[in-house]
Image (cartoon, grey):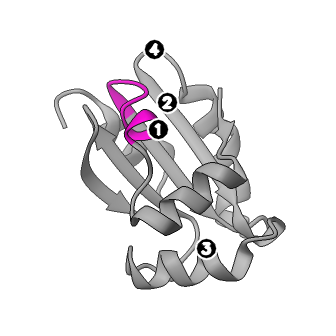
Amino acid sequence: MLTKLTEAECRAAIRDGEFSKEIIGAAPTVVLALTQSWCSQWIRMQPWLDDLSGEGVSCRYVEYDREPFFDDFRKFKESVFRNDEVPYLRYYRDGKLFKESNYLDKLSFRNIISPKA
């Protein structure tokens, strides 16, 4: 199941420069989608991202344009993570960042999250 990041989790990431160990270590593979609700690529990705969550993969997201911390989070994402596109995905394995991407198709995503990647 695709899980929404909370305001507190996002504000802590802004403060600390990264998401907490509890978030990025919540499963063997964790994917964070940082996006805006209007993005057509995000709208296409969301259903299959939700389907692929589980069995060792935790997928979480924030549509930060719908949040009271929009400006702070956008500035953080663009300056600290150096990515101004949406959707922006961060991939963690065993609590360590191993890949970043923007929109991709389901097969490419599966290839990234597979244990042999």
Please give left or right for residue 31 compared with residue 34 in the image: left
Q: Which residue is mark 4?
A: 55
Q: Which mark is on residue 58?
A: 2
Label 4: which secondary element: loop
Task: Verify whether residue 113 appears in magenta.
Answer: no
Alpha-carbon distance for marks 4 and 2?
8 Å
Alpha-carbon distance for marks 1 and 2?
9 Å
Mark 2 vs mark 3: in front: 3
Sequence-first tag of 1 and 4 = 1
Label 3: which secondary element: helix
Q: In which quadrant is the N terminus drawn?
A: top right
Residue type, numbered disc 2: Ser
Alpha-carbon distance for marks 2 and 3?
21 Å
| Badge 3: residue crowd in 10 Å (few <14, some 14–19, many ≥20) | some
Residue type, numbered disc 4: Glu
Question: Contact (CB < 8 A) between labels 3 and 4?
Answer: no
Q: Which mark is on residue 73?
A: 3
Residues in magenta? Answer: 21-29
Residue nearest the viewer, comparing 18 with 29 = 18
Alpha-carbon distance for marks 1 and 4?
16 Å
Q: Which residue is mark 1?
A: 23
Label 2: which secondary element: strand
Residue type, numbered disc 3: Phe
Task: Verify whether residue 28 appears in magenta.
Answer: yes
